[in-house]
């Protein structure tokens, strides 16, 4: 075989040749020779846990495609709802398909009154919106018990529609609750992001929530965040979904994965970091501190991108459009200086650490009027379509329940000692 690896078990002298397919080898082939030998791979650095036809990512070349379409082209020419359809169905919709999709999403944006009044109103007054979102998405499963029938294609479709449609409503609700503002009902005459901006901010006059430039900018940001291969939250979706739980509960688990500062929580941390730096002349000292091991440069680095994150490039253009409406975010100068210093510093270049999607997204969200603690919620809204696309693909592949091996490093067998005899 031209493209293969040969493995010899030195205990027995037995040999097996395993083909290299698509840049990897199959564990099933490996197990034919070595069923008792497993891989130790924390963080899945060298392990592909599934095959997927949704996102293509080349971290060295800085390429991201959804279903074969370059992210740059989708961001320029498409809409978030069209991209959500593409991710889920594998093809761009024709006019009729799109109209049905848009209609179905638009007419499922309402949440049950009990959800808002009884459940969401019960949170503590200063609850973090992301914590509220995680729990509220899980609570949705109690309103749609039929969603457990995950192999019924019709029920699956409506669960998917409901989740994508209700995310912005829940998100706006968490924010308005956290600032003590009354809930605003959805408006079916508005587009996906325009409706969301209205639910968030009406009637705040200092926020340009009804400006179409901001609705389009948010739509682009949603396109950029819709999917990203096997990241932590998407993997969570597939792992939890592999137990055949309902999609609301699986989405809640995926949202929980997104919440952490190493993943979707990073956009909030970037702004906190820029505020802590405070001014351009503090940038050098801050970078020195990071290099000496005091924390990390938030919004920098990526497990897969070892080149500029293509989404970060698009976001920089979107930022200009937004700042033309809202005025320039005063933290932008610090961010630009930080990027310049880091990209010219051997510590960052040798580790191939470049700005990721979150380095600039927070600056845009902040200029638009979103408070910091809503940033990760803004990530969860569009990523829901990616999670559901992976969940659907996984179910159609009839994959096994996720259940990795472990390396046991604990005590060997020992006898139970009664409490009065312990040292
Ligand atoms: N600042 C400073 N040093 C860093 C950073 C950073 N942001 N990221 C990685 N490094 C360094 C590490 O200290 C390590 O150095 P060493 O080899 O001397 O020990 C090396 O680069 C490799 O880092 P790892 O943590 O092994 O890289 P990994 O691929 O596991 O982590 C991650 C990727 C979590 C994204 C990391 O780069 C990070 O913490 N970045 C900051 C948080 C962030 O922006 N997250 C958002 C990611 S994008 C997203 O989820 C949408």
Image (cartoon, rainbow, N blue to C red):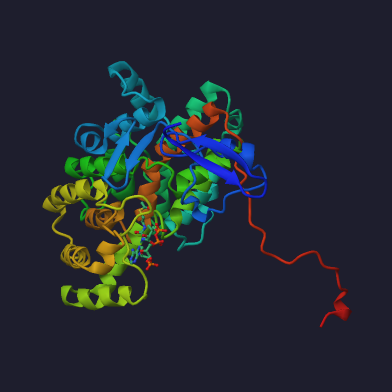
Q: Which residue is at the front of the view, 50 or 151?
A: 50
- Quarter where residue 383 is shown: top left
Position of residue 198 in the picture relative to residue 262 (left or right): left
Position of residue 40 in the picture relative to residue 129 (left or right): right
Location of residue 214 in the rendering, given as x and y in whole percent from the top left corner: 21, 45
Location of residue 6 in the rendering, given as x and y in whole percent from the top left corner: 52, 41
Q: In the rendered view, would you say 416 is above or below 253?
A: below
Q: Residue at x 20, y 63 (%)?
A: 343
Position of residue 418 in the picture relative to residue 150 (left or right): right
Q: Residue at x 50, y 37 (%)?
A: 50
Location of residue 371 in the rendering, given as x and y in whole percent from the top left corner: 32, 59
- Quarter where residue 69 is shown: top left
Q: In the rendered view, would you say 273 is above or below 194?
A: below
Residue, far top: 96
Location of residue 194 in the rendering, given as x and y in whole percent from the top left corner: 27, 39
Q: Residue at x 32, y 73 (%)?
A: 290
Q: Which residue is at the front of the view, 277 or 397?
A: 397
Q: In the rendered view, would you say 110 is above or below 61?
A: above
Q: Residue at x 22, y 56 (%)?
A: 367
Residue, far front: 13
Residue, far left: 324
Residue, far bottom: 423
Q: Looking at the image, can residue 133 be seen?
A: no
- Quarter where residue 103 is shown: top left
Number of dots carrying numbers: 0
Q: Which residue is at the front of the view, 172 or 58?
A: 58
**Quadrant in which ligand 1 is drawn:** bottom left
In which quadrant is the C terminus drawn? bottom right
Q: Looking at the image, can residue 213 be seen?
A: yes
């Amino acid at each position: 075989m031209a493209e293969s690896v040969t493995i010899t078990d030195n205990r027995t002298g037995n040999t097996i040749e395993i083909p290299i397919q698509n840049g990897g080898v199959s564990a099933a082939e490996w197990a034919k020779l070595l069923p008792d030998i497993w891989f130790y791979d924390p963080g899945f650095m060298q392990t592909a846990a599934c095959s997927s036809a949704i996102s293509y990512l080349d971290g060295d070349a800085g390429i991201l495609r959804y279903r074969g379409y370059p992210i740059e082209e989708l961001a320029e020419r498409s809409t978030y709802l069209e991209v959500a359809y593409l991710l889920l169905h594998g093809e761009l919709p024709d006019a009729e398909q799109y109209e049905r999709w848009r209609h179905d999403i638009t007419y499922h944006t309402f949440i049950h009154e009990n959800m808002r009044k009884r459940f969401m109103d019960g949170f503590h007054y200063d609850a973090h919106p992301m914590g509220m979102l995680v729990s509220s998405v899980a609570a949705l499963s109690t309103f749609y018990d039929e969603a457990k029938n995950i192999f019924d294609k019709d029920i699956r479709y409506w669960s998917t529609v409901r989740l994508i449609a209700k995310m912005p409503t829940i998100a706006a609700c968490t924010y308005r609750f956290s600032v003590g503002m009354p809930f605003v009902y959805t408006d079916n005459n508005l587009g996906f992001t325009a409706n969301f901006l209205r639910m968030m901010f009406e009637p705040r006059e200092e926020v340009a929530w009804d400006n179409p430039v901001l609705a389009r900018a948010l739509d682009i940001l949603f396109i950029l965040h819709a999917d990203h291969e096997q990241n932590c939250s998407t993997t969570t979706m597939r792992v939890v979904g592999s137990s055949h739980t309902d999609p609301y509960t699986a989405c809640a688990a995926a949202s929980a994965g997104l919440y952490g500062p190493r993943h979707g929580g990073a956009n909030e941390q970037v702004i906190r970091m820029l505020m802590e730096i405070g001014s351009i002349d503090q940038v050098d000292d801050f970078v020195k501190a990071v290099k000496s091991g005091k924390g990390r440069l938030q919004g920098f680095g990526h497990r897969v991108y070892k080149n500029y994150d293509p989404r970060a490039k698009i976001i920089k253009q979107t930022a200009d459009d937004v700042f033309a409406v809202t005025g320039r975010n005063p933290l932008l100068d610090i961010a630009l200086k930080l990027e310049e210093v880091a990209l010219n510093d051997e510590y960052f270049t040798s580790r191939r650490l470049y700005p990721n999607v979150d380095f600039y997204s927070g600056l845009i969200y902040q200029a638009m009027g979103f408070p910091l603690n809503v940033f990760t919620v803004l990530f969860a809204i569009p990523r829901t379509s990616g999670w559901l696309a992976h969940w659907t693909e996984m179910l159609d592949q009839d994959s096994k329940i996720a259940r990795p091996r472990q390396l046991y490093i604990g005590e060997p067998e020992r006898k139970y000692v009664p409490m009065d005899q312990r040292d």
